[in-house]
Amino acid sequence: MKIIITKKQYNLLKESLDNVLDLYSKKSKGETLKPSEMDILRAFDKYQKKGSNPEDFVFNQDDVYDTDEREGMRFKYNLKGRPFKFEFSEEINNGDEIEYYGEITFNGDEFLGVIVTDKRGYLIDYDFYSTSNNEDTRLQNILKDEDSDDEIQNFFQEQVINTLRGWKF
C-alpha cells in the first residue's frame, strides 16, 4: 500500500525526526537540554513505545502530557433505593497513599472530594464536601447518620478502587 503525502508533510516529518536526532546527539555529548527539548524526547519515546514508525513522528505539544484514560469513569450504586454516583477525575500517588479524586452525586446534591487508599489499594478514608450547600456539609457525616457508611465503604473498595487499580493505561 502506498501513501501519498504532500511535500510540506514530508518536510515536516523529516524536520521532526532530524530535530529528535539532533537532541539525542546533544544529550549523548553531555549537553544539558532545555525543558522544551526534553518534552520532545519524551513525546518521541512515548511514540516509539506504541510501536509507531520513528520516521512518521511529528511533535505535538499535546503528546507531552499524559491523560488518564480513566478520567470520567462513572460508578453507580443503589443506596437504599436512591442512586449514588461517583465520577473519577484524577489519581495522585503519594508513595504510601493513593488518592482518587472525583465527584459524587447523591440525594440531589453534588460532593467533591477524595477516596484515600494505602499503596496496596486498601481503603483508608474518604472525604467529600457539598458543592451546593456549604463546605461544612460532609457526605461521610450524612452516610453515618443514615447508617450507610459501611455499605458505601464496601462500594468504594469493591467497585471503585479495585476497578481503577486494575485499569491498564
Image: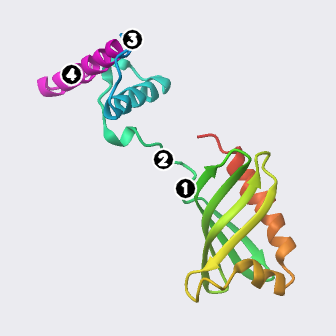
Residue appearing at x 76%, y 46% in the figure: 119
Q: Is 127 positioned to the left or the right of 64 in the image?
A: right
Give the labeled residue for mark 1. 71
| Element assignment for label 2 | loop
Which residue lies under the disc numbered 3? 28
Q: How many marks?
A: 4
What is the residue that sits farthest to the left in this orientation? Answer: 7
State yes or no: discs 1 and 2 in contact (Cβ < 8 Å): yes
Q: Main secondary structure of the magenta part?
A: helix
Residue 82 in percent (x, y) is at: 73, 82
Q: Nearer the viewer, mark 3 or mark 1?
A: 3
Q: Residue at x 69, y 44 (%)?
A: 95
Q: Secondary structure at mark 3?
A: helix
Q: Quadrant of residue 41?
A: top left
Q: Earlier in the sequence, mark 4 or mark 2?
A: 4
Q: Which mark is residue 15?
A: 4
Viewer can see residue 156: yes
Q: Which residues are magenta?
A: 1-26
Q: Nearer the viewer, residue 66 or 169?
A: 66
Query: Counting residues from the N terminus, which is met first, the one under dot 3 or under dot 1?
Result: 3
Mark 4: give few (<14), some (14-19) or many (20+) Cα within 10 Å: some
Q: CA distance from mark 4 to mark 1?
A: 34 Å
- Give the camera-side residue of 57 and 30: 30
| Residue located 63% across and 69% down the image | 113
Q: State which mark lies toward you, 2 or 3.
A: 3
Residue 156 counted in the magenta span:
no
What's under tag 2, amino acid-wise? Thr
Which mark is drawn over residue 111? none
Residue 67 - label: 2
Location of the C terminus by quadrant is top right
- Residue 54 position within the rendered picture, expressed as x and y whole percent measured from the top left: 37, 19
Say if 102 sits above or below 21 in the image: below
